[in-house]
Image: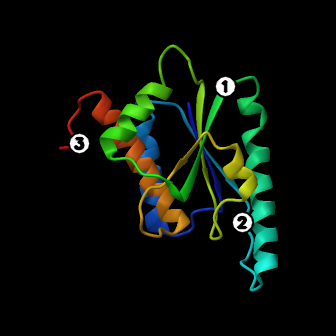
Amino acid sequence: MIRIVAVGRIKEPGFVLAQEEYAKRLQRYSRLEIIEVDDEPVPSGDRQRQAVKMREGERLLRRLRAPASAGRDCLLVALDSRGDQFTSEALAAWLDQHQAPDGRHGELAFMLGGTLGLSPAVLAQADLRLSLSSLTLPHQLARVVLLEQLYRAFRILRREPYHY
């Protein structure tokens, strides 16, 4: 099972449609759950921004511990611009290793921060910090890119046409 736990809701119609499309495509390969937690307006001061990031991180971690994941072994992946970058093939290999049929990890949870990123508490608990790009992506677009890359990874693993 793949869980995406994200700060904020996707509001732009194009991003909503893209998320729905890739979520539908992924259902063929894995159960998928997308959980959204409330975001907050970005304040002007650094101290206030850190407080917002901490509160958003607490909401993410609380949802990760929700009853849906109780009793399961969960691998936590934090999306972080300073994280490891993979090629699509390398992500597919990583997914294959950690989403093994032997149940090594019953669940993969991808954590996405809001405008301010992820809190240090979330990053500290991550088993992997994953960067989707050296470029800065809006968090709503990052979610769509993540879904597309997960779909691509499953297609690569099954040697199905999509990635050339």
Q: Which numbered marker is on residue 9?
A: none
Residue type at tag 3: Tyr
How far from the left and from the top, in percent, is residue 134?
42, 64
How far from the left and from the top, in percent, is residue 79?
55, 53
Residue farthest toward the bottom in the current orientation of the protein: 44
Q: How is the image coloured?
A: rainbow
How far from the left and from the top, in percent, is residue 48?
81, 77
Distance from the alpha carbon under mark 2 to that under mark 3:
34 Å
Tell which tag, 1 or 2, sits nearer the viewer.
Answer: 1
Mark nearer the N terminus (2 vs 3): 2
In the image, what residue occupies the spot 77% across and 37% down?
66
Q: Is residue 136 left or right of residue 55?
A: left
Residue bearing the label numbered 3: 162
Q: Secondary structure at mark 2?
A: loop
In the image, what residue occupies the spot 66% across and 59% down?
118
Residue bearing the label numbered 1: 73
Residue type at tag 1: Asp
Residue bearing the label numbered 2: 39
The quarter in which the C terminus is drawn is top left
Q: Is residue 101 left or right of residue 86?
A: right
- Vertical placement of 117 versus 5: above or below? below
